[in-house]
Every structure is written in C-alpha cells, then in structure tokens.
Amino acid sequence: FRCIITGEIMEDPVILEDGRCCDKSSLHNLGYDGPLLENFALKDAIEEYLQLYDSVEQRQLEWSAYFQDHQQRLRTALRGRAIQVQSLHTAIEKNLARARSLIPRTPSRRVRIDDRNVDSDGNPSASGELPFHCGPAPRSTDGTSTMTIPTHDQEATGGTSTSHGGGGGGGGGEGA
C-alpha cells in the first residue's frame, strides 16, 4: 500500500510501464510524463484497509475507555472491602477485649479465647493445655451415667447423693 518513491500510503495508485505501482502525485512531483494505468483494485483495497484500520482504532479506544472504567470500579470496590475488613477487625478486637474483661480474675482459671489458651487476665497459658477434660461422662457398670448431685439436705450438711440415669440433671436424688 506504500508508494515506492515516498514510502507513504498511496491515495491514487497507478501502474508504471515496468509493472511497479506508485502514487500518481509522487510521479507528477518528479516530472514523470510516461504512460500510467489507474490501479482501481489496489485503490479499493487501500480504502477498505483504511476503513478497517479506523474501525479497529475506534474499537481500541472504546476498549481502553471500558477497561479504565472497569479498573476504577474495581478500585472503588476494593477500597470498600478494605474498609469492611478494617471495621470487622476493630469489632473483633473490641469483642475480645470485652470477653477478657468478663473473665473472673481468678489466676488459676484458664479459658480458651480466640483459639488461644489464656488465663483470666488474658495472658497466654504456659502449658498450652486446657484445665478441664472433655469427653464422655463416667459410666457405671450397667452403662448408665453416674453423677453426684447434692440434695438440699446434703448441701447444708456437705454430703452428696448419687443418681443413676441418662439425664444430667435436675433433682435425680431428691425424691429417693
């Protein structure tokens, strides 16, 4: 599509006697007065190419504008998420502080808060173990749970009563 004389894209291509193509205006500027043949096929191809090039350039600009708009929206959304994360982090810290303040000030008591074993002052435990044991309740030989529940009378005297049963609770030893 470029003229062999100027190197520019041809506007009015013509064919010389030897079969090469040049822009008609370039030949006139050089003073060429030989026979020329209009190259309509090349001229149409150049026009279609320029139209396609303009179309691609327009789409490139549209894509660039879309991409910049999308980037800006994502930045705004990410800023909003960062603010939410910071707010949640602050709320968690406040709730942890509140939970620590509710723990009784008994030095021997250890409580798990935030997946860390801490004492009642909120300090990490040296042992890393919980002071209580989790697991099934003790069972008697007949397969029922055995629990020691003080009755009202025994609470006053310091004694206990044994209750058998699968429950866990209220008043198992009072009526017997």
Image: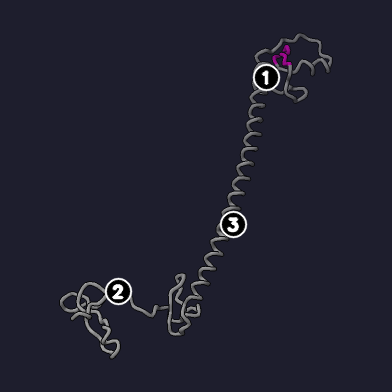
The residue under label 1 is which amino acid type? Glu
Q: SS for tag 2?
A: loop
Q: How many C-alpha atoms fall within 10 Å of the one at disc 1: few (<14), some, or many (≥20)?
A: some
Please name whichever residue, 42 or 147, is drawn nearer the observer in this view of the structure: 147
Query: Are discs 1 and 2 less than 8 Å apart at CB?
Result: no
User: Which residue is under mark 3?
Assistant: 83
Disc nearer the start of the sequence (3/2):
3
Please name whichever residue, 169 or 86, is drawn nearer the observer in this view of the structure: 169
Q: Quadrant of residue 16?
A: top right
- Residue 47 got which mark? 1
Residue most extreme to the left: 142
Dominant secondary structure (helix, strand or loop) of the stretch shown in magenta: loop
In magenta segment, residue 45 = no
Q: Is residue 41 left or right of residue 102?
A: right
Disc nearer the start of the sequence (1/3):
1
Please name whichever residue, 175 or 63, is drawn nearer the observer in this view of the structure: 175
Query: Who's the residue at 74% across and 22% down the image?
Result: 4
Query: Who's the residue at 61% across and 53% down the image?
Result: 79
Q: CA distance from mark 1 to mark 3?
A: 54 Å
Query: Who's the residue at 67% across and 12% down the image?
Result: 40
Q: Position of residue 103 (x, y in %)?
A: 47, 77
The residue under label 2 is which amino acid type? Gly
Up the image or down, 114 lies above or below 108; here it is above
The residue under label 3 is which amino acid type? Ile
Please name whichever residue, 21 or 77, is drawn nearer the observer in this view of the structure: 77
Q: Nearer the viewer, mark 1 or mark 3?
A: 3
User: Which residue is under mark 2?
Assistant: 135
Up the image or down, 59 lies above or below 86; here it is above
Q: How many C-alpha atoms fall within 10 Å of the one at disc 2: few (<14), some, or many (≥20)?
A: few
Q: Which residues are magenta?
A: 12-19
Q: Position of residue 84 (x, y in %)?
A: 56, 57
